């Protein structure tokens, strides 16, 4: 029993809390089985307190997965370290996307706006500006931004049509009935390849049939709040805990329907990450990242 | 892929410390930061949760001076080990030139070591890199705990389970005490620079 307690304590100091808890539970079982120790209430209480403490720490860690607001210096570092392209424009865009991927939405928004003003990959920059607004729960800000672009000259009519189509679909999926102003003039043809600058279709929402977990057998429709290439992020309400528990990182999601503004396609995806939101209006909710499997053939429906 | 500035003859390469959560990756970098002060060219940056777990990554820049007429700069990173930070690991691993896999010698972490190595293989494959071809070194960390009578995996068993197919250099270590940390990094740097020399056809 002494060696079990020693192990449990060491695992606790190493941060291996699950392992520590398991050992303490073993100790408790041993005490309860052994008549010699059964009356040692003090020892029993000490072990029980340790287990409760570990459970509390484990619960705190579960809640500690939010992306904290980092200092400007660290944000600069992220921007520089995670831009790989030799092409300067592409590298700047990668840096801004990295900021968004690390949850630094305010700074990412400023970067995407700066790139847009410079005319760097304007379609990608503009869509990411809208994504950042939506991730920050500022639907009105996203719509206002689109209106401003309409009255300005930053974007071509063709680009504005593409962005309008993208925003309209996102809002529709969110259940927001807003008539966005039309893009007047220029060609009225729909863009052939939405998101062609980014090399991957813009996904607005997904339909997933769950094959495991508490929601096994059910089909869920979820909106996409952010996208970087083939990685999409979705926000799930904390009230829908069963749904959160159904998305275990690493599980493969088969036959997911991906809705883009120009088509619907079917492909497989992998749950790559989930984090909880600790600040802002969506506090307590969860962000799920799903990687669309590029190796599968995209089945256009 | 390493950045080779032909004009200034500067090579910048990226080494990533990979492995299961709480295995000692950050402790490795902390020790390097403390022990190799002459080589460090900037502050160590750590982005942790309150529980001292790596949330995004740790970063430490090193300068090795001139080798064969080229200034060698090295960026050391760690990944977050916890399973749920998969996409962050992929992001940190992007453009990697060499990997140190820090395995946990505690018996209770046996399965986690194997899962993390498999995760590394998959994430490298997504970058069209093979775990069998990339400069890779294994470190069996926490060997000092043997003195505490805590159940540890034997080096022989770890070799069999983690290194049977890879057949790469491996080092018993204690990142907390610094034992084996320098040797692990030196070997990884050696393999990485040899690999880059072949890839970039760089000669003095």
Image (cartoon, coloured by chain):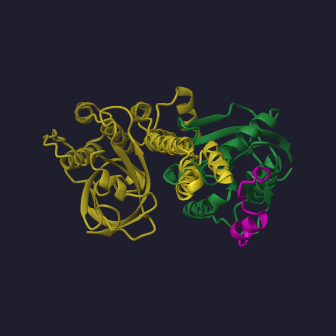
Q: Residue at x 69, y 66 (%)?
A: B162
Residue nearest the viewer, comparing B154 with A182? B154
Image coordinates for residue B183, horizontal then vertical, percent = 83, 50
Q: Quadrant of residue A178?
A: top left
In the image, A10: left or right of B186? Answer: left
Q: Is residue A79 magenta?
A: no
Q: Which residues are magenta?
A: B145-165
Q: Is residue A236 above or below residue B31?
A: below
Residue B93 seen by the camera? yes
Q: What quarter of the picture does the N terminus of chain A occupy?
A: bottom right
In the image, A203: left or right of A17? Answer: left
Chain B representation colour: green
Q: Is residue B110 above or below residue A144?
A: below
Q: Is residue B152 magenta?
A: yes
In the image, A46: left or right of A234? Answer: right
Q: Residue at x 56, y 64 (%)?
A: B122
Q: Residue at x 46, y 38 (%)?
A: A67
Q: Residue at x 63, y 42 (%)?
A: A13
Image coordinates for residue A124, horizontal then vertical, percent = 38, 45
Chain A representation colour: yellow
Q: What quarter of the picture does the C terminus of chain A occupy?
A: bottom left
Residue nearest the viewer, comparing A204 with A234? A234
């Amino acid at each position: 029993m002494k060696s079990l307690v020693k192990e449990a304590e060491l695992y606790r100091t190493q941060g291996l809390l699950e392992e520590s808890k398991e050992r303490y539970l073993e100790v408790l079982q041993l005490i309860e089985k052994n008549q010699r120790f059964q009356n040692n209430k003090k020892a029993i209480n000490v072990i029980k307190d340790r287990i409760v403490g570990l459970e509390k720490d484990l619960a705190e860690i579960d809640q500690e997965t939010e992306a904290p607001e980092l200092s400007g210096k660290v944000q600069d570092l992220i921007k520089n370290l995670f831009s790989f392209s030799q092409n300067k424009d592409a590298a700047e865009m990668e840096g801004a996307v990295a900021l968004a991927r690390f949850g630094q939405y305010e700074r990412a928004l400023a970067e995407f706006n700066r790139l847009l003003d410079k005319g760097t990959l304007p379609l990608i920059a503009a869509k990411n500006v809208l994504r950042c607004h939506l991730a920050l729960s500022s639907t009105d800000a996203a719509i206002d931004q689109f209106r401003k672009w309409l009255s300005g000259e930053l974007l071509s009519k063709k680009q504005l049509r593409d962005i309008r189509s993208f925003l309209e679909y996102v809002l529709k999926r969110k259940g927001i009935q807003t008539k966005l102003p039309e893009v007047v003039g220029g060609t009225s043809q729909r863009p052939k390849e939405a998101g062609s600058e980014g090399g991957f279709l813009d996904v607005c929402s997904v339909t997933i049939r769950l094959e495991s977990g508490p929601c096994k057998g059910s089909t869920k429709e979820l909106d996409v709040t952010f996208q970087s290439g083939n990685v999409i992020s979705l926000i799930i309400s904390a009230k829908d805990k069963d749904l959160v528990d159904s998305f275990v990182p690493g599980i493969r999601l088969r036959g997911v329907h991906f809705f883009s503004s120009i088509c619907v396609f079917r492909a497989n995806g992998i749950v790559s990450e989930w984090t909880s939101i600790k600040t802002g209006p969506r506090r307590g909710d969860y962000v799920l990242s799903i990687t669309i499997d590029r190796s599968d053939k995209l089945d256009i429906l | 892929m390493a950045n080779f500035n032909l004009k200034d003859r500067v090579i910048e390469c990226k080494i990533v410390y990979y492995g299961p959560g709480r295995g000692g990756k950050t402790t490795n970098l902390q020790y390097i930061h403390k022990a190799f002060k002459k080589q460090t060219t900037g502050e160590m940056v750590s982005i942790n949760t309150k529980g001292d777990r790596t949330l995004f990554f740790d970063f430490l820049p090193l300068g090795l001076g001139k080798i064969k007429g080229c200034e060698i700069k090295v960026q050391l990173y760690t990944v977050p080990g916890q399973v749920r930070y998969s996409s962050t690991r992929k992001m940190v691993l992007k453009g990697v030139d060499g990997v140190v896999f820090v395995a946990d010698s505690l018996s209770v972490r046996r399965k986690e070591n194997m899962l993390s190595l498999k995760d590394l293989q998959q994430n490298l494959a997504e970058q069209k890199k093979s775990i069998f071809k990339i400069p890779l070194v294994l470190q069996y960390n926490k060997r000092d705990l043997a003195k505490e009578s805590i159940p540890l995996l034997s080096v022989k068993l770890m070799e069999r389970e983690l290194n049977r197919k890879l057949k790469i250099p491996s080092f018993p270590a204690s990142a907390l005490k610094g034992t084996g940390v320098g040797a692990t990094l030196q070997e990884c740097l050696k393999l990485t620079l040899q690999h880059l020399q072949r890839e970039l056809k760089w000669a003095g």
